[in-house]
Amino acid sequence: MQNPYDLRDRGLPSIKALIAFEATVRLGSMTAAARELDSTQPAISQRIRQLEDSLGTLLFDRTGGRVATTETGRRLYEDVSNALKALESAVRQYKTSGIPDKRKVTIAAHFGFAHVWLLPRMTDLEEAFPHLHFEITPVDVDDAPEMAQADLAIRFGRVKPDEKNERLLMNEFVFPICSPSFASKYLISEVVTETQLSTVPLLHLDRADPRWLDWEQWSRLAHLSMPVQKPRIRYNNYPLLLNAVKEGFGLALGWSVLVEQAIKDGTMVAAGPSVERKGYGYICRSRFLDNAVIAPVAEWLAATMNNGRPSNV
């Protein structure tokens, strides 16, 4: 049975002989060809002799101590040179495209967390896992199909202690935030007072969701009287609310994970008291938490989130 990979079975000369021939013609001598190919002049000469024998014709005129191509040699050089260039181009192409694709890891997360915390840290995440390709999907609700389909789903809410597919990334820490100019205007320092809560503009989310603290719940946990003022403006997502805070429109509740970078940058000011609602936090959910690929990503998320907790609240 013919071996399809044996060039001799196809009547073709050795590829080494063709390469030696092409280099000799291109460089002008067998010595130069031997140098380029990390070989010896006798070995190059032998390969060319073998090539001539296989073709049944002379490729070089060796009379008078010179090595010049014959007419057949010149024509063969053009064909072999073009063929080797095409072969080199093909190999280079497949060297690049033949690299195995990075494994894709999909992460679904609530809109606010995805836009405020995760996306700004994508460069750090990709540098930590250069062999992975991450795809981020922002979602609005826990029961979105993307949350169930993702390799990792990050949700905020009540911790389920017996849920084996979930891991707590960080507990919930919530405190008042505002812009530096707003703090200066309303004399807000380290701790807000009950009077300030009743008089300064308070910013509210537009969604009644038991997972998230509102001003009334936060005040109760902080052992402060509830604000008596009614919300004048509500914002339908957290990134929009944070933009309003930065513009100095009012005082809002800040979740440490989502605002720690803005506090470090000085675009927001954190005030006390900070409350921790036991049993609530950011949770990573996955069917693959024991997987050698997914588990380190969950570890990285937890470590990065906890290192970012502001120390002054």
Image: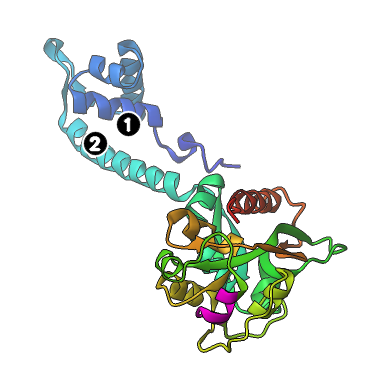
Label 2: few (<14), some (14–19) or many (≥20) C-alpha neighbours in 10 Å: some
Tag 2: amino acid: Leu
Res 276 visible: yes
Q: Which residues are magenta?
A: 195-204
What residue sits 55% from the left and 45% below the top?
Answer: 128
293 or 110, which lies in front?
Answer: 110
Color encoding of the figure: rainbow
Residue 59's quadrant in the figure? top left
Q: Position of residue 167 (x, y in %)?
A: 76, 58
| Residue type (three-letter) at the residue carrying disc 1 | Leu
Q: Position of residue 91 (x, y in %)?
A: 40, 43
Residue beneath label 1, please?
55
Residue 312 drawn in magenta? no
Q: Position of residue 88 (x, y in %)?
A: 35, 41
Q: Position of residue 199 (x, y in %)?
A: 53, 80
- Which residue is tagged 2? 76
